[in-house]
Amino acid sequence: MSAFDECALFRIAWITDPHLNHVPASRWDPWCDALRSSDPTALLITGDISDGDDGWFQLDRLTTGVTCPIYFVLGNHDFYGGSVAQTRRRAVQAARESSRLVYLTDSEPIRLADDVYLVGEDGWGDGVIGDARTSPIRLQDFQQIDDLRGRTTDDRLATLRAQGDESADRLRQKLMQVPDAAVTVWVATHVPPYRESCWYEGRIADDQWAPYFVCGRVGECLDDVAARRPRMNLEVLCGHTHHRGVYRRAHNLRVYTGAADYGHPAIEGLIEPGGLKGLAGSA
């Protein structure tokens, strides 16, 4: 637990899919100025920081551009050029060597206030939702990530489903660690946990796209925890699709999917004690 694990008056700037390797040098300083001007107590990045190893360089740049802690999970692009295990080890190492980086997938629940917590998990398009076996979709992930390159459809699907299972198991353990008195838990992940939260130009993902843009196992985990703990509100933040939407899954479970535009990183919303501010359709 770091010195930044509790902020009684928190104001967290949420960013998703910034793909910082696409940001021209001329936009970097204005981008950092915008972050600072929002006066956050922390930044939260829900994946796709950059492509592969460049992500560590970009995170380092951010720690010099802003002075607040940076909470993050990884997206599929962050795993490019290596294996899943290797990349996560790098993320763990980077966070443990920095006083201001917190890799949420490797972190216990973070207490933001007396009754508010933050947890995170990378997630993965795990092939559970939709029709993965007949889908013609071929992502760059299949060539850029060691675990998926050169695999048959069945082998690749088995790998994706294993990643979804592991993500759900880790997330469940964290959510069950949150005290019963918690009123709100912010859940940061990269991949939308439901088809209905996987948006593209106002439409939800069909059976062809959903296998690689929805983490079905994480969705099942969230459903179960929400049912077991009906007095605890789960507020999920995700990205991956680059298109915005809000989906109310249950009375105590809501998903915010953030938008993104290559080369133009932006603050998607501000997480404050009163809720999420700035996202279309939010409180």
Image: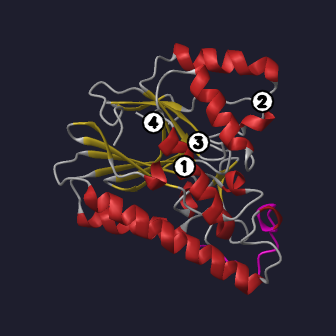
Crowdedness of circle 4 by 10 Å Cα count: few (<14), some, many (20+)? few
As measured in the structure, the alpha-carbon distance from the residue carrying label 4 to the one carrying label 1 is: 35 Å
Q: Residue reaching furthest left? A: 181
Q: Quadrant of residue 27?
A: top right
Q: Of callouts 3 and 1, which one flags the residue occurring earlier in the amino acid sequence?
A: 1
As measured in the structure, the alpha-carbon distance from the residue carrying label 3 to the one carrying label 1 is: 27 Å
Q: Does the segment drawn in magenta span residue 133? A: yes
Q: Nearer the viewer, mark 3 or mark 2?
A: 2
Q: Is residue 267 placed above or below 91 in the rendered structure?
A: above
Q: Position of residue 255 (x, y in %)?
A: 47, 50
Q: Which mark is residue 282?
A: 4
Q: Of callouts 3 and 2, which one flags the residue occurring earlier in the amino acid sequence?
A: 2
User: Type of residue at label 3?
Assistant: Gly
Judge whether residue 191 can be spotted in this image.
no
Q: Of callouts 4 and 3, which one flags the residue occurring earlier in the amino acid sequence?
A: 3
Magenta-highlighted residues: 129-142
Q: Mark 4 and mark 3 in contact? Answer it, CB < 8 Å.
A: no
Q: Nearer the viewer, mark 3 or mark 1?
A: 1
As measured in the structure, the alpha-carbon distance from the residue carrying label 3 to the one carrying label 2 is: 18 Å
Residue drawn at the location 34% of the way across and 32% of the way down: 3
- Label 1 element class: helix
User: Type of residue at label 2?
Assistant: Val
As measured in the structure, the alpha-carbon distance from the residue carrying label 4 to the one carrying label 2 is: 27 Å
> Closest to the observer: 216 or 175?
175
